[in-house]
Amino acid sequence: MPNWLRIAATSPSAELSGLLAEGLLACGGSAIEEQGDTLVTYILSVDDPDAALDRIRDVLQAVLGTDAIELSADEVPEQDWLAVWRAGLEPRRIGARLIVSPTWSEVNAGPDDLVIRIDPQMAFGTGEHASTRGVLRLMQQLDMHGARLLDVGSGSAILSIAGALLGAQHVVAVESDVEAMQNATENVDRSGIAQRITLLCALVDDAFIDAYGGGAFDGVVANVLSSVLLPLLPVFHRALAAGGWAILSGILVEEADTMRAAAEAAGFAIDAEDVEEQWWSVTLLRI
Ligand SMILES: C[S@@+](CC[C@H](N)C(=O)[O-])C[C@H]1O[C@@H](n2cnc3c(N)ncnc32)[C@H](O)[C@@H]1O
């Protein structure tokens, strides 16, 4: 019988928590939960638990470049962890109008509410992460009517569906991870506005924007790590039409100054900011 290990890992600094999550996923971790400064996940181990913990420690040290990671493991009885996690999810109101709900829940929606139904399959894209919620709140402060949107790293397509529900004329949802595509397709298909969303499995970079032409979009939403966002700022600027905007998240509060300066250098002005937990989200206006 295989062992399941509940792994709790605390990174030495908040800046490294994104990398720590990536490292845990690389070790085979399923959906990662944030519990304060600690990330918790479940890993299937065919070795003995001590050997498995040593292997996980080695991988995390290599990914983070430090051995200052607090790590603990408890053996837990075999369960369907995805099912346990899914069963704990409930509809969530985010901002004034959006409600993100698992597909199976009943939702008490008011006449002005917009409901996004997601089949929760992965750690991101369910509305359970503060950086996703930051983007969703900032999106509701803008007038999306008639906008052409680019969703960079669309995952479950949660932000694309939100954009279309908020009135965007068309959304190009781009995700580089092929495994996310099926879940995104199902979420978009049940959204009722699938004809306004195009899902693509691709990497957004200069060449991608060349294919569309500069100025092809009125808005960009991107909830990806700040190390990915920084080199993409000039790419987003080129992708946007005059007066366009970009909502960025996946940025830690302590990275905000660096991101503000880089955004201004790339030709953006800061329009609005949002903070939840340690995550900073920002709306940039193209100058
Ligand atoms: C943090 S998840 C965000 C998912 C969803 N948009 C949300 O807000 O919950 C970031 C996603 O971006 C994808 N990604 C990162 N860089 C990308 C790029 N340059 N082009 C396309 N996808 C990218 C990753 O594969 C990952 O699925």
Image (cartoon, helix red, strand yellow):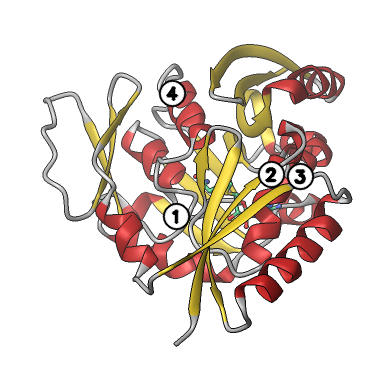
**SS state under label 1:** loop
**What is the distance, in whole Å, between disc 2 and disc 1 at their CAs?**
19 Å
Q: Which residue is mark 3?
A: 228
Mark toward the start of the polypeptide (2 vs 3):
2
Label 1 CB sits under 8 Å from any ligand 1 atom: yes
**What is the distance, in whole Å, between disc 4 and disc 3 at their CAs?**
22 Å
Q: Which residue is mark 1?
A: 156
The amino acid on which the numbered mark 4 sits, given as a three-letter code, is: Arg
Label 1 close to label 4 by CB (< 8 Å): no
- Nearer to the camera, 67 or 285: 67
**SS state under label 3:** helix
Mark toward the start of the polypeptide (3 vs 1):
1
Q: From the viewer's perspective, is the residue at label 4 or at label 2 nearer?
A: 2
Q: Quadrant of the C terminus?
A: top right
Mark toward the start of the polypeptide (1 vs 4):
4
Q: Which residue is mark 2?
A: 18
At horizontal 62% and vertical 80% (from top left) the residue drawn is 48
Toward the bottom, the furthest residue is: 1
Mark toward the start of the polypeptide (2 vs 1):
2
Q: Which quadrant holds residue 55? A: bottom right
**SS state under label 4:** helix
Residue 259 percent location from the top left of the image: 78, 24
The amino acid on which the numbered mark 1 sits, given as a three-letter code, is: Ser
The amino acid on which the numbered mark 2 sits, given as a three-letter code, is: Gly
**What is the distance, in whole Å, between disc 2 and disc 3 at their CAs?**
12 Å
Residue 137 numbered tag: 4
**Dot 1 surroundings within 10 Å: few (below 14), some, or many (20 or more)?**
many
**What is the distance, in whole Å, between disc 4 and disc 2 at their CAs?**
22 Å
Label 3 CB sits under 8 Å from any ligand 1 atom: yes
Label 2 close to label 1 by CB (< 8 Å): no
